[in-house]
Amino acid sequence: MNVNGRHYRTIWLNADGWAGDIIDQTKFPHLFETVTLRTPEDAAVAIKDMLVRGAPLIGVTAAYGMALAMRRASKGMHMGEAAELKGDDAKPVVLSVQGVSDGKNLRDFSIALRAGEITGVYGFMGSGQIELARALFGKVALRRGSVRLDGKAVRFRSTAAARAKGIAFVPENRRMMLFRQEPVYKNVSISILDRIHRLWLKPRAEKRITEAHIKDLQIRPPRTAIPLGSLSGGNQQKVALAKWLTHLPKVLILAEPTRGMDVGAKEDVIRIVKSLRDKGVAILVLSTEPETILTLADRVTVIRKGTVPREFATGHIEKADLLAAA
């Protein structure tokens, strides 16, 4: 761009991500070198460097404007329009679902969840995603088909049976699994009370476990004893996830994990979910929002009227592809 007769190159976008340089080619060539900007953090470092070198204010302002533009763009793309899927068939299958039907919303549905992978299930509202999640967590009975966990046939007749086998579920409605009037630490520890002590509760142990999760997940405000209902929706979702983090599940099922959150809360939840994947958890994300699926999933299964019309395992995929398949 040209500002008061000085020429500055602006950032540009290529297939590898954000890249570009900030340089005054006319008057201050000795002050600058080419700076690669792939993230807003890179831009922040470049701005600091420019200030240290005594760059003219107009140059710093231009860089700051680029940083803001990159931050806005990265947030917009974070819940994005496209993704590069990286499904890996070499990873072991933890949960295999073959030809299941519930007699109403699911019809011959099949899917495989692999260790250290996020599988997204996308479809319009009423397509059967929620029924699938509830069936895998023992809330809905399946009439046909088979479910195998670590290669062994299983049938979850209750949520307790599913939990005992290492299945965790965070539903689309947080109120279904959280106690808003109870303190944060009780909401975190409720799923592991038997591990804290089988005969009586130990609030000190519950609070100690919760304090660690508050720090790791950046739950705000960072207080264990306040009522859960006083937290924002995004922080309540973090508490819902924290329930399952003390002892990692084999399979984590997330229904609409980022719905209704602001950008900052969405980024935090996305970071948490991906960190769980990196620890080897097999994760199933179900959503009616294509942006959520594209942001999180390593592979995608589309669901339409309880069936699978299309699957995407690797390569480039766009929002339009999901909409067309659904």
Image (tube, rainbow, N blue to C red):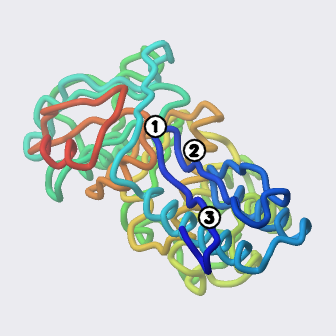
> What's under tag 1, amino acid-wise?
Ile
Label 1 crowd bin: few (<14), some (14–19), many (20+), radius 10 Å: many
Q: Quadrant of the N terminus?
A: bottom right
Task: Say which residue label 3 marks.
Answer: 8
* Left/right of residue 283 with respect to residue 82 in the rendered view: right
Q: Who is closer to the viewer here, 26 or 228?
A: 26
Label 2 crowd bin: few (<14), some (14–19), many (20+), radius 10 Å: some
Q: What residue is drawn where x is 21% and y is 39%?
A: 302
* Left/right of residue 244 with respect to residue 315 in the rendered view: right
Q: Position of residue 33 (x, y in %)?
A: 78, 51
Task: Say which residue label 1 marks.
Answer: 118
Task: Say which residue label 2 marks.
Answer: 274
Among numbered discs 3 and 2, the one appearing first in the sequence? 3
Residue 188 lies, with reference to residue 296, above or below; the image says: below
Q: Who is closer to the viewer here, 8 or 118?
A: 8
Q: Quick check: can you spot residue 202?
A: no
Q: Position of residue 102 (x, y in %)?
A: 15, 40
